[in-house]
Image (tube, coloured by chain):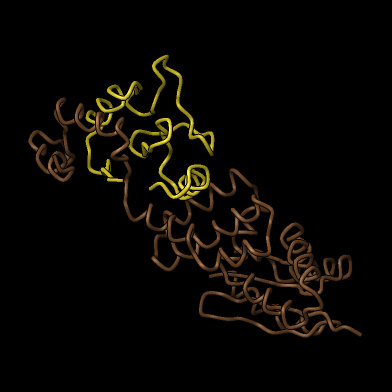
Chain colours: A brown, B yellow
Amino acid sequence: MSYEDPIKSVSEGAIKGLLNWSFDVVKNLASKFKDKELAFIQDEKTIRTVKEQYNSGELAIYKEYVKDKNILFLLKMGLTLRKLEEEKEDERKKNLRNKIFDRYGVKGVHISQLVENGILNRYIGILIEGIVSLEKFKEDLRNVLENIEQHVIFVRVGDQGRNIIKQAITITSSHSPIIFIVSGIFSAAEIVRDCERKLIELLNDYTMEKISSKNKENLFFRRILR
Amino acid sequence: MEFVSLKQVSPQSKILLLKELGYDSDGEFVLHKNGNKILDRYLEIPIKIENMVILQGSEIILDDNELSLSKYLEEFGDVL
């Protein structure tokens, strides 16, 4: 029996357009499940999205340089968030972000956001431009991922510009990161734009480059090596 | 592996299916036979029948979200 058949054929008596399966159909499906012939899912698109990230080339590159399994998983979640954003699956994206927060806390969300916003790829690009050795590169990458709060400010809607600037000065003077990032999306992108001039003026040990789009503003400050 | 979508299936049919597989439901959550709520293996949250997926690998019932499904793939390999 095809599994198109039971689903399509038992609509009689359906409530609110939902399908009712007869006892025989349920028995048959359960038997096939026990024989490992099928799985019960909600939406095949979700499975496709997850599998795409599981097999993605970008993840394969991260796997080369990041060995911590939890961090790698969060990078994968970042790819998934980006995919959901591309597909305008706002509810699923919000739900996934909440699940990441519940399981991994705010740090987990930030690590995922690093990938989602394309920050990590540019960060890796900057590291490669000044690469001394592969070991140093891996160490720098590990350092940013494990201590993300010392390298990136994720601006949120409602944040005050002056607090962002104060936080940027505190972080750069305490930790002297080689690359320091201020990132905002949607309404928060505007807050980042508003801080840009002041940040350039105050972070005079750094040069700035940015990746901007309508909804994103990422400022990369690279420490000047003297 | 064939997929059967539960998205458009009535709650009554889902409960019937759960019972046939040795589980139960209070109409909202997936339960063990003893009445305890089954928790999503990776998030440790109760699973609503409207949002459940039932996957291979010792009959795994999960909440339908990308995090749990990704964890499942990591644990069981590319089985879907």
Where is residue A10 shown, x and y percent of the image? 11, 37
Q: Residue at x 73, y 61 (%)?
A: A148
In the rendered image of this protein, does residue A123 appear above or below residue B40? below
In the rendered image of this protein, does residue B71 appear above or below residue A135? above
Quadrant where the N terminus of chain A sits is: top left
Along the horizontal axis of the image, is B76 left or right of A206? left
Where is residue A200 shown, x and y percent of the image? 77, 83
In the rendered image of this protein, does residue A128 appear above or below residue A157? below
Where is residue A73 shown, x and y percent of the image? 59, 53
Q: Residue at x 77, y 74 (%)?
A: A179
Splitting the image into 4 quarters, where does residue A135 fall? bottom right
Quadrant where the C terminus of chain A sits is: bottom right
Q: Residue at x 64, y 59 (%)?
A: A111
Where is residue A124 shown, x and y percent of the image? 68, 74
Nearer to me, A213 or A4:
A4
Along the horizontal axis of the image, is B59 left or right of A196? left
Instruction: Give the farthest residue toward the right.
Output: A226
Q: Residue at x 34, y 33 (%)?
A: B49
Inspect this view and state whether residue A56 appears.
Answer: yes
Inspect this view and state whether residue B52 appears.
Answer: no
Along the horizontal axis of the image, is A1 left or right of B54? left
In the rendered image of this protein, does residue A215 appear above or below residue A138? below
Along the horizontal axis of the image, is B50 left or right of B38? left
Instruction: Give the farthest residue toward the top.
Output: B34
Report how many numbered discs are placed on residues in the image. Answer: 0
Nearer to me, A22 or A38:
A38
